[in-house]
Structure formats: structure tokens, C-alpha cells
Image (cartoon, helix red, strand yellow):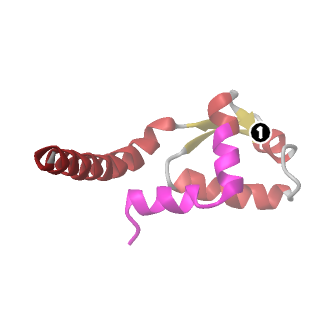
């Protein structure tokens, strides 16, 4: 069973998915057809990427008539930020300990 973190890391591991997410976050909502026009791959290929992003809750999709409109959901990245913050703190602690050690040697 994949965790939310696993799904997000899977989603952001692919450069096309990162670019799709980027377009949706920086721009506005786009249809799958509009997203497809930004890439040199088939609409079906874009749809596969969108399903992975949707499973990771990085995008949401609303139906408007015959179109499916995609929206970027930045809140999903909080899982990654939280995971990385542990390592930020780890390295800060290590560097502070090194600084303290070096200042005692002087």
C-alpha cells in the first residue's frame, strides 16, 4: 500500500509531471486538451500523467461540460516539505555542533 508521501514522490519523480503541475500552479486551471498542447506527447500520455498526479492529490479535476478542467493543489507538497524539514534540522544541528567544536579549539 502506497502512502501519501510515496505517491507524491512518484508523481514528482517524472519531469513531465513536474511540468504539468508547474503549469497548473503558475497559470490557472487548464483542460486536458490545453495541457496536451504544451507537450510533444499524446493526449493519452498526458492523461496517464494526470492520473498519477491526481492519485497524489497534487491536482483536482472538475468536469465542465465535455471538458475536464485540472487545478494544481499545492497543499499536497506539504508532505514533502515536512519530510525535508527533518533533514534541514539534522544538518543544521550537525553544522552547529561543528561550529561549536571548532570554536572550542581556537
* Placement of 7 over or under 30, stated as above or below: below
Residues drawn in magenta: 1-22
**On the picture, is 2 further left or further right than 104?**
right
Q: Nearer the viewer, residue 87 or 83?
A: 87
* Placement of 32 over or under 25, stated as above or below: below
* Placement of 25 over or under 50, stated as above or below: above
**On the picture, is 78 further left or further right than 87?**
right
In the image, farthest residue toward the left = 104
For image coordinates 56% across by 57% down, the residue present is 11
For image coordinates 29% across by 51% down, the residue present is 91
For image coordinates 40% across by 57% down, the residue present is 4
Q: Are there few (<14), some (14-19), or many (20+) residues within 10 Å of tag 1?
A: few
Q: Position of residue 61 (x, y in %)?
A: 62, 41
Q: Nearer the viewer, residue 23 or 62?
A: 23
Q: Position of residue 33 (x, y in %)?
A: 83, 43
User: In which quadrant of the rendered image does the N terminus lie?
Assistant: bottom left
Secondary element under disc 1, as helix, strand or loop, is strand
Which of the 4 image quadrants contains residue 69? top right
User: In which quadrant of the rendered image does the C terminus lie?
Assistant: top left
Q: Position of residue 36 (x, y in %)?
A: 83, 47
In the image, farthest residue toward the bottom = 1
How many numbered marks does the figure carry? 1
**On the picture, is 101 further left or further right than 67?**
left
What residue does disc 1 label? Answer: 67
What type of secondary structure mainly makes up the magenta span? helix
For image coordinates 77% across by 39% down, the residue present is 67
**Residue 24 falls inside the magenta stretch:** no
**Residue 20 falls inside the magenta stretch:** yes
Amino acid at each position: 500500500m502506497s502512502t501519501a508521501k510515496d505517491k507524491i514522490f512518484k508523481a514528482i519523480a517524472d519531469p513531465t509531471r513536474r511540468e504539468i503541475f508547474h503549469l497548473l500552479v503558475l497559470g490557472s486551471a487548464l483542460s486536458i486538451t490545453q495541457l496536451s498542447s504544451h507537450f510533444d506527447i499524446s493526449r493519452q500520455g498526458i492523461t496517464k500523467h494526470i492520473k498519477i498526479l491526481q492519485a497524489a492529490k497534487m491536482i483536482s479535476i472538475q468536469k465542465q461540460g465535455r471538458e475536464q478542467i485540472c487545478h494544481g493543489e499545492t497543499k499536497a507538497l506539504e508532505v514533502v516539505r515536512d519530510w525535508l524539514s527533518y533533514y534541514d534540522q539534522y544538518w543544521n544541528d550537525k553544522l552547529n555542533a561543528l561550529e561549536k567544536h571548532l570554536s572550542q579549539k581556537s
